[in-house]
Amino acid sequence: MYAPLQSGLAFGLIFFACLGLANTVEAETSLVEIGRRIYEDGVLPGGDPLVAMRPEGFLMKGEYAACVICHRRSGMGSVEGNVSNTVLIPPIAGTTLFAGARFSTVPLDPSHHYIPNAAWERALTRGAYDMLSLSRALRDGVDPDGRQLVAPMPRYDLDDVAFEALGAYLSQLNSEPDPGVESDFLHLATVVTDDARPGHVEAVLGVLREWSDFARGSGMPWRLHVWELSGAAETWMSQLENYYRKRPVFALLSGVGAAEWGPVHRYCEQNRIPCVLPSVEVAPFVGDDWYSVYYSPGVGLEVGILSEFLSEGSVPLGGDASIIQLYSDESGRYAAGRLSEKLQRDGVAVNRRRFHTISPRATMKGVSAADVLVLWMRPDEIMQLVTELPEPPVSYVFVSALLAAPEELQLPEAWKHRVRFVSLFDDLGLQGELARLRLEQWLDGAGQTGPPYRRLQADAYAAGNLFNDALGKIRKQEIRRPVVPLNREHVLETLEKLIYKYSDSTNLINIESHVAWYGRMSLGARQRVAVRGGTILRYATTGSEKLVPVSNRIVP
């Protein structure tokens, strides 16, 4: 007669125990989230802005006082300044913060390690923090060994609730490997959308598969997974979720698309998954997004370059002249629409037409010699137009170098004389030549010399090289700090320092650069598009394939 009562009592005890455990987990998760808002956003538990005082005596509030400004999202810190005045922002992720620095218990030999100043030496030799010493560091500016912390480390106005939340967040920060990291493999994916041109897909995948076969920057081989997206773009998010559910990956590397990449971008931002240097023709608006990194905005940047070039009066536009734009697909339609908006605001007559392969000559009906022709078209379509019209009916023809690479065109002399390329690929000097020779040697050794899509192959090659280099640099840091699980944010922050290139003078040439065509590129903490300018190019002579600049570099 007591069995039902005993069973019910046991069930009740288990129920309340599980409920208590669930409440504990929820409370811990909530505490970590409150700590994240302090760390990343500079917002205290009650919603007030975080307040901090720099050693120099000035106040910082809100986002400007947030830890992430210096210690970064990964908690792995950064290095600022030049060789003679270097500031080390030490890592504060839990696995490094609550352990002694690399040389806390062994001698630090200055002849073997770069130590530019006393603050750097203290960061490499300090003892381990605990919650009490962390509280003193944040509130009073004293490290675990009782030494005063120097600028730029501020002193924070934190009550006990805020400190507990921030401590909970730091304790778990970078404490576990991110999804996709296994003991034997690093799982990566590359995304292919169904609006990408078939030849482009094979060009990119061939290079990425080769990288996957031999890349060892992280100390483990890559496993590359190809995620193909098809059907309506509205379904792509769910397709990506299904792919990820079956096989979580550390990052999306390279990839290829055309006019639609927004769902991929949103998926990466919402799930905090790096999307590194895809080859797309229309990049989404980045704004304050952080996890997606692009070479350029795509044809939208070409629009800005051409609009500014035309507004400078570099091309004579008579009273009856019009800008005649021809496009053939969604990427071209997008570019033609953007250019029309810009030019019409300046009172320029603009005409947009879809190119019809059945009747190219009819597409050009009504075009006069005073007009300017802009082609947002593919190489085969341009060659079809050239075949129909061996002598162009206008004096100036502008061609998108992103949609129709010059090396994919075989133009007759009459067209070469009039064609100008709107190009983001403006490294025409020694640095670019060396990088292209290196690319050719690598492609030849990899057996990837077949397709003619060199610029796409160059993008995929540089993405693989830069990503592998970032992993390698993170691994090398372990000689100066405790080993930390591989972290997505740390890789992106490392890429910020690796993705740079300047081609303005021979003094700035980097002979080790693996970026073959872009002349200038850089990233930053809040900068996720590397290329922000380009040049108008023409053929050096009608009998040559060499290109020379018509304009200075234009940054719209």
Image: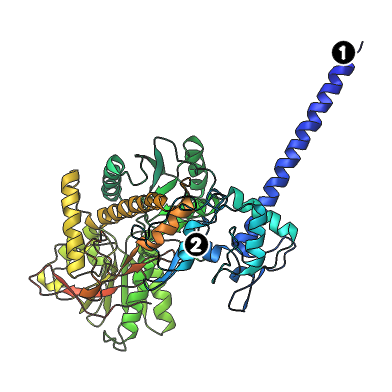
Q: Quadrant of residue 428?
A: bottom left
Taking the spot 89% from the left edge, 18% from the top edge, the residue there is 5
- Tag count: 2
Q: Nearer the viewer, residue 143 or 425?
A: 143
At label 2, which amino acid type do we have? Answer: Arg
Residue 372 disc label: none
Q: Is residue 45 left or right of residue 427?
A: right
Q: Which residue sits furthest bottom?
A: 319
Taking the spot 19% from the left edge, 53% from the top edge, the residue there is 452
Mark 2 vs mark 1: which is more N-terminal?
1
Q: Residue 393 location, x and y as percent?
A: 19, 75
226 versus 163 height, above or below: above
Q: Secondary structure at mark 1?
A: helix
- Could one spot residue 272 in this view of the protein? yes
Q: Nearer the viewer, mark 2 or mark 1?
A: 2
Quarter that holds the N terminus = top right
Residue 3 disc label: 1
Q: Residue 114 location, x and y as percent?
A: 37, 62
Q: Which residue sits furthest front?
A: 107
Q: Which residue sits furthest left?
A: 543
Q: Residue 125 location, x and y as percent?
A: 49, 57
Q: Quadrant of residue 136?
A: bottom right
Q: Is residue 17 left or right of residue 349?
A: right
Taking the spot 46% from the left edge, 67% from the top edge, the residue there is 118
